[in-house]
Structures are given as structure tokens and as C-alpha cells.
Amino acid sequence: MDALKIIAQDSMKADAPKFNVGDVVKVHVKITEGDKSRIQIFEGTVIAKKHGGINETFTVRRVAHGCGIERVFPLHSPSVDKVEIVREGVVRRAKLYYLRDRVGKAAKVKAKYN
């Protein structure tokens, strides 16, 4: 079991970003099409964080053209280039699945003011 932990430690990102559920983030994802690769930005609200360690994932939700889109990203994946925090949110839940049923202003998360 210790050998597995050592292998997992080597493949984890040292500079993994610190963000919480409720934050609005921009995820820079590497997309490979044929022999070309590019960076695509997916911006939305983090509605869930799951697991831990090497298997940690986070779910980002956005509404585009009236249709809700959710993507699950592995935090330590090489395809995730970087994660920028746009705005910090104030929430009292670990999972924000209730935002799926809300429309318009009701689907917003309160911003954190310093």
C-alpha cells in the first residue's frame, strides 16, 4: 500500500489551486484535435468536490443559452492546465445540487466580500 501512495504522490500536482464549493472558476483545459492542441476555458460555479488525494474531482456548472452544462474535472489531470478563481462564494452546503432546479437570479451564489 505504501508503494501505491508513493506513486500517487509523484503524479499529484504540487501547485494545485485552493478553491471551495460555491466559487466561480475558470478551468483551462487542453483539447487535442488530431495533431493540434489548444486551450479551452470553461467558466462556472463549483457545485461539488469529491474524493481526495490523486482521485480528487470537482464539478463545474454553467448555464449557456438557457441550457445547464456540468463538467467533472480531475484536479490532478494533465489535461487541466490551470484553474483561476474569478469570485469566491459564500455557501453553507458541501454539494450545491439544488442549483440545478433554480433559474435566473435564484441560481446565483452570494459573493464573499472582504
Image (tube, rainbow, N blue to C red):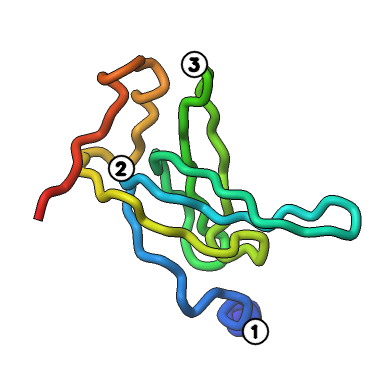
Q: Locate residue 86, reporting x and y percent.
A: 34, 51
Secondary structure at badge 2 equals loop
Q: In this rendered view, identify the residue nearer to me: 78 or 64.
A: 64
- The mark nearer the N terminus, 3 or 1, is 1
Residue type of the residue flagged with mark 2: Gly
Residue identifier under label 2: 22
> How far separated are the C-alphas under marks 2 and 1?
35 Å
Percent x, y of residue 22:
30, 42
Counting residues from the start of the chain, the first of labels 2 and 1 encountered is: 1
The answer to which of 97 and 45 lies nearer the viewer is 45
- Position of the N terminus by quadrant: bottom right
Tag shown at residue 3: 1
Give the label on residue 21, or none: none
Q: Quadrant of residue 4?
A: bottom right
Above or below, comparing residue 3 to residue 107 in the picture: below
> SS class of the residue under badge 3?
loop
- Contact between marks 2 and 1 (CB within 8 A): the answer is no
Q: CA distance from mark 2 to mark 3?
A: 20 Å
Q: Quadrant of residue 38?
A: bottom right
Tag 3 residue: 66
Image location of residue 105, percent across then percent down: 26, 20
Decide which of 51, 42 is in the foreground and name it.
Answer: 42
